[in-house]
Image (spheres, rainbow, N blue to C red):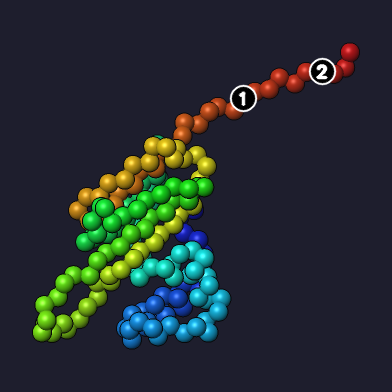
Amino acid sequence: MAVMRYDPWNTLRQLQSDLDRFFGPGTANPGLGALARSGEENGESASNWLPAVDIREDEHAYQVHVDLPGVRPEEIDVAMDNGMLTIKGQRDSEQTESGTNWKRVERVRGTFFRRFTLPENVDPENIQARSRNGVLEITVPKRAEEPAKRIQVESADG
C-alpha cells in the first residue's frame, strides 16, 4: 500500500504554509511556479490543514485513523474512486467573544483534504467509516484472494 509519496517540495511548501498562516491570508507568493503546482496536483493547496493519519494493515483489512478533533461526522466526506481513498471536510472556527485578548492561536480551522492510493486487493463496496472521540476510523477490507488457476498445457503435436 502506498502510504506516502515522496515529494521533494513538501518541506518548502510546509514552510510557505506556516509563513502564510503567520503573516495572514493573501501573502502567498505567486512566483513559486512548480512548487505551488505540486500542491495543487494532490489537493493540498485547497486545504488549510492536513490532519495526522495512521495506516495499519493486517491480513483482513487496512485500518486508517485520522485525527479530526472538533470535526463533526457530518462535516467529513470519505470517498473511494479509481483506487483512491479521499478524506475531506472542514473544521469550523469557534465564535469568540468581542474584547477577548488571544495570546496564541495554533489550532488550524478550515478545510482539509487527504488522498491515498490503495492496492487492487481492496473491497471498495464494504468500506466502513466512523468517528469516535475526534478520531475518524476507516476500515478498508481486503478481497479474498482467489488461488491461481492452473491451466493444462496440451500438446499440439499429433
Seen in the picture, residue 95 relative to 16 is either above or below; the reply is above
**Where in the figure is residue 38, as x and y percent of width and height?**
52, 70
In the image, what residue occupies the spot 41% across and 49% down? 79
The picture places residue 146, in percent across and down from the top left corner, at: 53, 28
Give the camera-side residue of 6 and 37: 37
Which residue is more in the foreground, 11 or 110?
Answer: 110
Q: Is residue 109 above or below residue 132?
A: below
On the picture, is 102 further left or further right than 137? Answer: left
What residue sits 27% from the left and 64% below the top? 91
Q: Quadrant of residue 115?
A: bottom left
Q: Residue furthest top?
A: 158
On the question of residue 5 being in view, the answer is yes
Tell me the CA gap for discs 1 and 2.
19 Å
Decide: marks 1, 2 in contact (CB < 8 A)? no
Q: Label 1 crowding class (10 Å Cα cut-off): few <14, some 14-19, many 20+?
A: few
Amino acid, disc 2:
Ser
**Residue 63 versus residue 8 in the image, above or below:** above
Tell me what residue is drawn at x 35 percent, y 53 percent: 77
Q: Secondary structure at mark 1?
A: loop
The percent coordinates of residue 155 (x first, y second) are 82, 18
| Front-most of residues 29 and 63 | 29
Q: Quadrant of the C terminus?
A: top right
Q: Where does label 1 land, which residue?
A: 149
Q: Residue at x 25, y 52 (%)?
A: 73
Question: In this rendering, would 157 be left or right of 25?
Answer: right
**What's under tag 1, amino acid-wise?**
Lys
Q: Secondary structure at mark 2?
A: loop
User: Circle 2 is placed at which residue position?
Assistant: 155
